[in-house]
Amino acid sequence: MNAPDKLDFKRIFPLFVIVLIDLLGLTIIIPLLPLYAVSFGADPFTIGLIGAVYPSMQLIAGPFLGSLSDRYGRKRVLLFSQIGTFIGFVILGFANALPLLILSRVIDGLSGANIIVAQAAITDVTTPQTRTQGLGLIGAAFGLGFTLGPALAGIALAVSGNNYQVPAFLAAAFSLGSILLTLFWFKETNPAEVRQAAAAAQAKSGDSWLNRFIRALSSPLVGMLLILMLMQQLVFGGFENLLSLFTLNRLGMNAAGNAVLFVYVGIIIVIVQGYAIGRWSRRFGERKLIYAGLVLLGAGIIMTALTPTQPVPWYSRDAMIEELSTDTATRVSVELPDDSNTGPLGLGWLLVAMLPTSIGGSILSPSINSLITRRTDRQQIGSILGTSASMVSLANAITPLIGGALFQWLGSSAPFLIGGIILLLLFALATRTIKPAPDDVPQSPAVAVS
């Protein structure tokens, strides 16, 4: 095998470790944030607003910071981003009211270019033949992070007696670790001459993200794929954001219990994205995987909406109220189930529903991005994938607002039920608009991180 066909693991491995450590900090607090906000008296719509803060700030700052890494180097921008994340986690740990919780997410979002810069660094040190494999390691880091992070959160909560500050400080510790690794282990991947050329090109170019976005949407097929990317992230992102509130309302599960559920989802994602999707893509092709992903995610989300209201066997309503109340005057704004009819049915149903949900969500994003690259001119692939990533950030900013409003005003099932129906309608539309092309030979899709 020629050298260009072999991945340089010595250069990729530090990036993999740095991203994994960084993601552990993020995934530790994901199951925590909604219930942390509830403990301060936030209602579901306010929790949705809080969930929208980070991706909204990232949507604003991410492309700018990515551009800065082209001009000034990956290491400098990565360190800046990681320091912002660390400060955000520390503020979260000390938060004693909603404004501080919101401030922590604003700071983290405005500095949040960690993954963008890591992907750019991998592009620097890989060849076209090894780039997919290199980016696949970032996808593996995501899967491991979403498996290990919630598990660590659950352990921290159990050891601390459900003290929500402890996981936040643990996340800050992991963030500090990623800073030290970047400072002493990571070597700059973007040479000075390349940075100078990038600065000159950016100075001459007047092309904006909005212009690229409009051009992409003007293509019937690529535009449809970008809409699918937006909608699947709206639904699957809503599932991730609202799952803790849904299980609190329907099953009486606390933060530790939800951490275990996120581990369950993370294991499914690792298996699908780390192993199964390559085999499925070679056998069926991306187009059929998109169809299957829409059906699986749509059906799974609808099944989630229909989860029976039966609290888990260990649930106590009084104990839950005490756990969520920071003081005796705090009112728990999410309706809690009665504890007179506990049992395994509700949890068992949800675990079954999460299988198609997680599998569908795992195969959609990489399959859509892979098909986009096959239907786009080679010279525009980087730009169009950047537009696709922007659609994901846009969805992540919108979905907590929409989901929180539907949850509060129409009930806990509404966001999932409506999202599932929309995806099934999009499946019918996709079968009419995404047709096979003469060059559609099945191949392994590029792993996309969302």
Image (cartoon, rainbow, N blue to C red):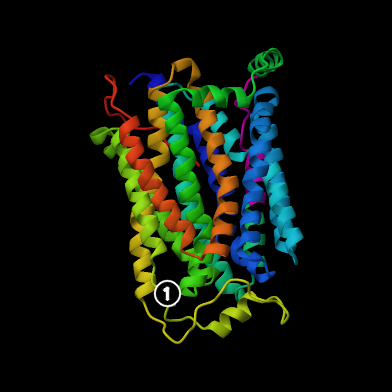
Q: Is residue 144 magenta?
A: no
Residue occupying the far bottom of the picture: 340
Q: Is residue 176 magenta?
A: yes
Where does residue 193 sit, x and y in percent of width and height? 66, 14
Q: Nearer the viewer, residue 332 or 118?
A: 332
Q: From the viewer's perspective, tell me whether residue 93 is left or right of residue 263.
A: right
- Give the quarter of the figure containing the N terminus: top left
| 133, above or below 104, in the image | above
Tell me if residue 112 can be seen. Answer: no
Residue beneath the point at 72% across and 54% down: 104
Where does residue 45 sit, x and y in percent of width and height? 62, 60
Residue beneath the point at 60% across and 46% down: 397
Residue beneath the point at 39% across and 51% down: 421
**Which residue position is annotated with label 1?**
309
Numbered label tally: 1
Q: Quadrant of residue 96?
A: bottom right
Residue occupying the far left of the picture: 283
Quick one: label 1, few (<14), some, or many (20+) residues within 10 Å? some
Residue span colored magenta: 175-191
> The residue under label 1 is which amino acid type?
Thr
| 359, above or below 391, in the image | below
Q: Nearer the viewer, residue 409 or 40?
A: 409
Q: Nearer the viewer, residue 160 or 410?
A: 410
Where does residue 184 sit, x and y in percent of width and height? 66, 39
Q: Nearer the viewer, residue 134 or 317?
A: 317
Residue beneath the point at 52% across and 57% down: 149
Check disc 1 and report its element: helix, strand or loop: loop
| 411, above or below 141, in the image | below
Tell me if residue 172 can be seen. Answer: yes
Q: From the viewer's perspective, tell me whether residue 346 is left or right of residue 188.
A: left
Where does residue 130 sit, x and y in percent of width and height? 42, 26
